[in-house]
Amino acid sequence: MRKCDRDLTAFEILSPDVQAVPVVVASPHSGNCYPDDLIAAARLDALSLRRSEDCFVDELFGDAVACGVPLLRALFPRAYVDVNREPWELDPSMFEDELPAWVNRGSPRVAAGLGTIARIVSEGVAIYRRKLRFAEAEARVEQLYKPYHAALDHLLAATRARFGTCLLIDAHSMPSAPGVAGSRAPELADIVLGDLNGTSCAPVIIEAAEALLTGLGYRVTRNKPYAGGHTTLIHGAPREGRHCLQVEINRSLYMNERSLQRKAGFATIREHMRTLIDGLGVLVPDLVAAK
């Protein structure tokens, strides 16, 4: 965990000198810069707060730039504001004042405690010791959520303008088992690929990703239990030449889920994610005529 003030930078873009292929990688949940107001309001210790992070995912996909692909990474933590939600999915029970009528209070994410401002960390433990004010949520959305999405929109639009098509790889990690921070449950996949059940990218993309990763020795499933989130929904429109694939990596493959320390095989998985980016980068340009 890094401790940061309220003026923390929303994101960082790592860019190649020249973008070689119509692919963009985004890591929305690997940020570990924790603002003072979150630390002060939280009832959890630092390690517990970090349970919601997709720890090190930006590093696992860090060779994107060497592949000629830009990498966008959020610097703020998911526990502070979740950019893979609508901007206003809020739980009224978390706030001391009345929420505006236009707030989405009834989404499944809000019901699960994982709205735009999360009520719980991934293991189901409440984050806050007090109720928030709507102005706090509004500040997080304006200062962090909106700039992140503006940067992502710009990268994707520039890619499409140059190449005629684009693929967003939305990079995530998943706990080895729901609510468990321990050894990997054998029934769970190593990697889950999400295309919103066949709607967010051309079938050849997810088929190629599955074949490539399976060939590298991973157990891969599609869309279960993670089909995609808000980002996949808004950026996946294959008929318009906009493709989005969500990639969820089982955390137990590369880190100790209790201590949040990298495992010895970390570098190998990073190398394999570079192979994935390279493989899809070769494929996507051919989709221009098929859009």
Image (cartoon, rainbow, N blue to C red):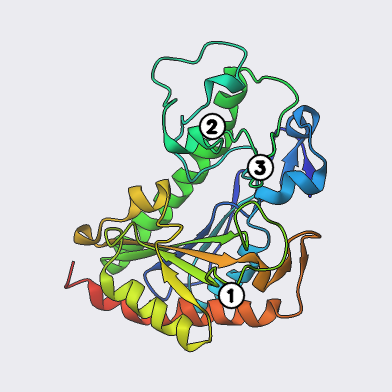
Does residue 211 appear to the left or right of 136 in the view shown?
Answer: left
* Label 1, residues with CA under 10 Å away: few <14, some 14-19, many ≥20: many
User: Who is closer to the viewer here, 218 or 31?
Assistant: 218
Image coordinates of residue 119 in percent, x first then y, are 62, 33
Image coordinates of residue 26 in percent, x first then y, are 51, 59
**Pointers 2 and 3 in contact (C-beta within 8 Å):** no
Q: Which residue is mark 1?
A: 63
User: Who is closer to the viewer here, 264 or 70?
Assistant: 264
Residue drawn 36% across and 70% down? Answer: 22
Find the residue positioned furthest to the top. Answer: 97
Does residue 244 appear to the left or right of 92 in the view shown?
Answer: left
The amino acid pointed to by label 2 is: Val
**Viewport quadrant of the C terminus:** bottom left
Helix, strand or loop for disc 1: helix
Q: Quadrant of residue 194?
A: bottom left
Q: Which residue is mark 3?
A: 121
Q: Which residue is mark 2?
A: 141
Helix, strand or loop for disc 3: loop
- Mark 2 or 3 closer to N-term? 3
- Mark 1 or 3 closer to N-term? 1
* Label 2, residues with CA under 10 Å away: few <14, some 14-19, many ≥20: many
Depicted 290 relative to depicted 30: above or below: below
